[in-house]
Image (cartoon, helix red, strand yellow):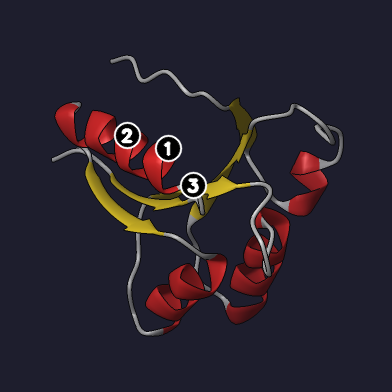
């Protein structure tokens, strides 16, 4: 079985499109429109192999989500999804393994 991914992005169209592409590639995908919803899922025992986080979301940015997640203890690898490419320096210090640009292209 392929990896279970958490996809967190406030852009409904992007989240749905990327989620469907990932499902087509065989991944299990759980999607959230906000960082707070994703954190609630993790704090209530949910998990995943990898989390794809939008960098710029209202209320909680991707980095905010990652910091809270790390503070609470869930151990899910986090990838940053960013449309602008801004602020790429320091991702590893923030805990992101890598940055994916948006729009993302899924390939096997």
65 to the left or right of 22: right
Q: Dots 1 and 2: beta carbons under 8 Å?
A: yes
Residue located at (64% from left, 56% from top): 57
Secondary structure of the residue carrying numbered label 3: loop
Q: For residue 22, what is the image quadrant?
A: top left
Which quarter of the figure is the C terminus placed in? Answer: top left
Few, some or many C-alpha atoms within 10 Å of disc 3 (few <14, some 14-19, many ≥20)?
A: few
Relative vertical location of residue 104 with respect to residue 89 in this rendering, above or below: above
Residue located at (27% from left, 43% from top): 3
- Cα gap from disc 3 to disc 2, whole angstroms: 10 Å
Relative vertical location of residue 78 with respect to residue 76 in this rendering, above or below: above
Q: Dots 1 and 3: beta carbons under 8 Å?
A: yes
Which quarter of the figure is the N terminus placed in? Answer: top left
Which residue is label 3 attached to? 11
- Cα gap from disc 1 to disc 3, whole angstroms: 5 Å
Residue located at (33% from left, 73% from top): 46
Secondary structure of the residue carrying numbered label 1: helix
């Amino acid at each position: 079985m392929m990896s279970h991914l958490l996809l967190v992005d406030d852009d409904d169209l992007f989240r749905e499109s990327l989620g469907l592409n990932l499902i087509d590639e065989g991944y299990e995908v759980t999607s959230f429109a906000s960082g707070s919803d994703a954190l609630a899922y993790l704090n209530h025992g949910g998990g995943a192999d990898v989390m794809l986080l939008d960098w710029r979301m209202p209320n909680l940015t991707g980095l905010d989500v990652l910091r809270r997640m790390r503070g609470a203890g869930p151990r899910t690898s986090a990838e940053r999804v960013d449309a602008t490419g801004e602020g790429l320096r320091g991702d590893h210090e923030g805990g992101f393994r890598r940055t994916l640009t948006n729009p993302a292209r899924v390939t096997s």
